[in-house]
Amino acid sequence: MIALRSFALLGLVLCLDPPWPQAPPKILVFSKTAGFRHDSIPDGVGALRGLGAENNFAVDATEDAAAFTDANLAQYRAVVFLSTTGEVLDVGQQAAFERFIRRGGGYAGVHSASDTEYDWPWYGGLVGAYFRDHPAIQRAVVRVEEPAHPSTEALPTAWERTDEWYNFSSNPRGGAHVLATLDEATYMGGGMGADHPIAWCRRYDGGRAWYTGGGHTRESYGEPLFRRHLLGGIQFAAGLAGGVCAGAESVSAASFRGGTLARDSIASVFGAGFAEATEAASSLPLPTSLAGAEVRVRDGLGVERPAPLFYASPTQINYLVPAEAAAGAARITVAGAGGAVAAGAAQIGTLAPGLFAANADGRGIAAGYVLRVRVDRSENVEPIARLEAGRYLAQPIDLGPPTDEVFLVLFGTGLRGRPSLASVAARVGGVAAEVLYAGGQGQFAGLDQINLRLGRELAGRGEVEVTLTVEGQAANEVRVNVR
């Protein structure tokens, strides 16, 4: 096993909210139709371009599914499916979009985005619910259920407007966080009853998803409140704005994926109004209270434990999942000075592998370093990331002469419960990499370390992806640059 070494970057990774790029981010608007075509699509594209110009993000628009490649999607923060219909992507394009979301990309679905890709179950989970039918265009009241979200914070509690109101084939509640519902008593033709969601959001497979059922009419895109609704949803999907997307939504602090949280791993919980200020733990043992906030984990056996905290802010807390927590369904409660603030559900398990990224966003340049061992057995530690204009960029790895052994040391969480080293597999640039160690880092609570031997066939490859699986469970992908 390669010796454990400290790495200053991890202080940022464990204790800060994710920073965002300095350059204006880019959004892709996709409006291909393979069924009914809405005449409001040009109005929607124009509205989104205007919102981008007014709010410092760039907008590209296309109806060409060939845009769905890994290389092209990598330049965007989010993809907006604007009134798409039918089967619009082939298998390869679907796979590229799945990888985009898993790397932390965002999705915003507008109106008939829910009338799209019925034969692609992954997309069904992303959009939250499929379209079923609709009555005639008419006026109705939308009831805002979650005002602490950028897509609803500017809306009146009872928002009356005209649109084509969808009934859905299933209720997204439970899988998604409902932001607004339709009051079926205020119009004719509602088919979902007292609980009729019309806008919602969720974290999904490593990314963020937001959907609104509005946007059928051309007039919608000229309405100031509907434009604010769209803007907030896109900003949320792109990670440009926070906002509650669950009462207290916990994800891996490395991968930003929800679902299962591993015992003795580092998790992040998102919400609103958590802490009185921003505070990071300054010593060991970790405290169970920071800035007036606490996190409590009640496991499937009903045992509640306080979680040690790394960092607390009004919208995010990074905490250690108690190692003693029983596997199964759990309840995560964030409590402030005045008592319970928010609560949410999670699954506790043994494994939930995630790799930290240098920019603390679950994607992009890996958090780690290179250890070089020369022929005389002398060692040198070299960075794989450099800080420029407030953001980490890849520092090229030089493999050096053939007599050098070059090891890539990465940081993660959620994999120390592996049954054996044989259950861990890694690839760098598609090439199998020998895994020498995968387990506890030894200096930071909950932090894991992975040591890989880099092969000389990677020389000159430039930026390549690093993939890791543990017991068949894939971690989020990160990148390194090999000169």
Image: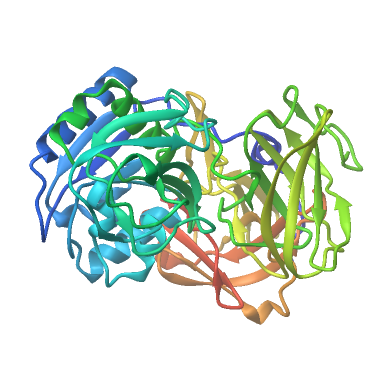
Which of these two is toward me, 87 or 429?
A: 87
Give percent across and percent down for residue 421. Answer: 69, 77
Give percent across and percent down for residue 3. Answer: 77, 58
Residue at the spot 7% in from the left edge and 42% down from the top edge:
39
Give percent across and percent down for residue 291. Answer: 80, 27
In the rendered image, the residue lying farthest to the top is 54
Q: Is residue 376 visible?
A: no
The quadrant holding residue 269 is top right
Which of these two is toward me, 180 or 286?
A: 180
Relative to 274, is 63 above or below? below
Query: Residue 31 vs residue 306: left or right?
Result: left
Query: Residue 55 vs residue 409: left or right?
Result: left
Q: Is residue 173 visible?
A: yes
Which of these two is toward me, 192 or 314?
A: 192
Query: Residue 465 vs residue 288: left or right?
Result: left
Quadrant of the frame with the N terminus: bottom right
Give percent across and percent down for residue 238. Answer: 40, 38
> How was this image coloured?
rainbow
The quadrant holding residue 80 is top left
Relative to 114, is 456 above or below? below
Q: How many marks?
A: 0
Query: Residue 44 vs residue 186: left or right?
Result: left
Residue at the spot 66% in from the left edge and 48% down from the top edge:
380
Residue at the spot 25% in from the left edge and 21% down from the top edge:
53
In the rendered image, the residue lying farthest to the right is 285
Relative to 470, is 333 above or below? above
Residue at the spot 40% in from the left edge and 31% down from the top edge:
232
